Image (cartoon, rainbow, N blue to C red):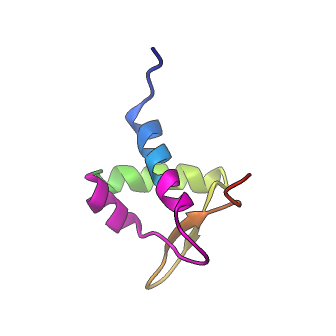
Amino acid sequence: MIKISKQTDYALQFMGALGKLTGTAVLSLKAFAKESSISFLFLQKIAGLLRTAKLIQAELGRGGGYRLGRPLGD
């Protein structure tokens, strides 16, 4: 049996939620953390790692959030 860390599990959940977005929509990290019962600070750390790997992009400012850094097929 393969074991994956909580960090990997949460990253996959977050990426899956981002994959469901359409158009120019973004997903708020705070909203996803609350909806998924994941620590916001832990999710912030994960999002930082995903941004560094260029897997996600951040939209800053009011109404901002995250979206996939590449098309879903890539």
From the viewer's side, name the closer residue of 70 and 7: 70
From the viewer's side, name the closer residue of 42 and 22: 22
Residue 33: image location, x then y, percent: 32, 58
Label count reads 0
Residue at image location 40% in from the left, 64% down from the top: 29
Quadrant where the N terminus sits is top left
* In this picture, residue 47 sits left or right of residue 56: left
Residue at image location 47% in from the left, 49% down from the top: 46
From the viewer's side, name the closer residue of 22 and 50: 22
Residue 23 in magenta stretch: yes
Point out the residue furthest to the right here. 74
First to last magenta residue range: 15-37
Q: Looking at the picture, does residue 61 appear above or below residue 58? A: below
Residue 27: image location, x then y, percent: 46, 69
**For residue 5, what is the image quadrant?**
top left
Residue 48: image location, x then y, percent: 52, 55
Residue 39: image location, x then y, percent: 29, 52
Residue at image location 56% in from the left, 59% down from the top: 19
Q: Looking at the picture, does residue 32 appear above or below residue 10? A: below
Q: Looking at the picture, does residue 41 appear above or below residue 10? A: below
**For residue 31, what is the image quadrant?**
bottom left
Point out the residue furthest to the bottom here. 62
Point out the residue furthest to the top here. 1
Residue 20 in magenta stretch: yes
